[in-house]
Amino acid sequence: MFHSVWGSGCGVRTAHSLLTGGLTLLLLRHRTDVSPQDDAWPHLQPLLFVTLVTCSTALYYRVSLMDPGYVLTDCDEKEEQETTSQNPGAVRMRRCGYCLLKQPMRARHCKSCQRCVRRYDHHCPWIENCVGEKNHRVFILYLALQLLALLWAVRIAWSGFYAAVTWSEWLLANILLLVAFMVIGVCTVVVILLLVSHLYLISCNVTTWEFMSHHRISYLKQCDSDTSPFDRGIIRNLWSFFCTCGNVVWERVYIRDTFSTV
């Protein structure tokens, strides 16, 4: 399930594409490390850089337009009753006050998307879409690829600065490249912080929403602020995140790991 390209977020996606394309063209028109060289493959480096940027942009559109894991129907009431009868202390599923659907554990209603999202992480204004159970892995892959493209772009921009006798002459000759370098530098720092923070939370099996709103979430109130009932160790958490296909029944994980220690 994908969103319409011309739907909500069209302006954000257009701005992202224009900024990416503009910066790429600006870097390629200057004489830098990726400029055609006098060797057997003069256009290899610019072609590889453009390919990396294109793949990053394609992943951006994919994560921006794909279904993050919307809750489409009520959860299985029979399964909920069996779970509650076997474990009286289990947290009951709540009915969303906006879309009136029963939310599975770790789901949350997004007011921007006006839908409930499974294993909701956050609503990202950069992609104008939620990050949830279905697109979180693609989001991480996009961040990693985007970081590679940005780091390469920083090197390209740095190698393109012209030398000059005075500061005024240097600034006049490099003003556009300097602006591009600053924009790319800021974006690089942001992407690094996002990627590192997400990988840390993934290694703990905690979502951004759970980390920020731990004290307000019913199934986390009995846990310490620095622990999660879904945490099964770094290796198993990473394996579960990157290698598990399909929706996870978090109620079963919660009951197995929480009530087995009681």
Image: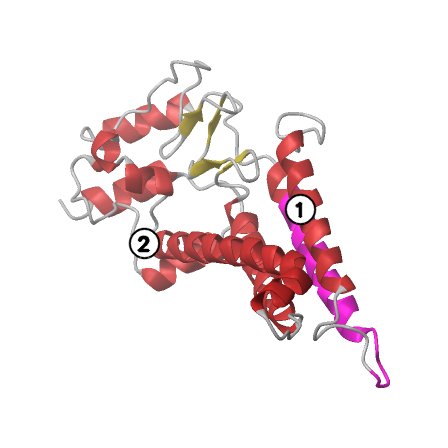
Query: How many residues crowd around disc 2 within 10 Å: few (fewer than 14), some, or many (20 or more)?
Result: many
Q: Quadrant of residue 173?
A: bottom right
Amino acid marked by disc 1: Leu
Residue 101, position in %: x, y? 44, 18
Q: Residue furthest bottom?
A: 39
Residue in the picture at 20% in, 34% down: 215
Residue in the picture at 52% in, 34% down: 69
Amino acid marked by disc 2: Cys
Give the side of residue 49 with respect to residue 259, left or right. Answer: right
Which mark sits nearer the N-terminus, 2 or 1? Answer: 1
Picture disc at residue 19: 1
Residue 75, position in %: x, y? 44, 25
- Region of the chain picked out in magenta, as a range: 38-61
Q: 34 or 56: which is nearer to us?
A: 34
Query: How many residues crowd around disc 1 within 10 Å: few (fewer than 14), some, or many (20 or more)?
Result: few
Q: Residue furthest right?
A: 40
Residue 9, position in %: x, y? 62, 30
Secondary structure of the residue carrying tag 2 is loop
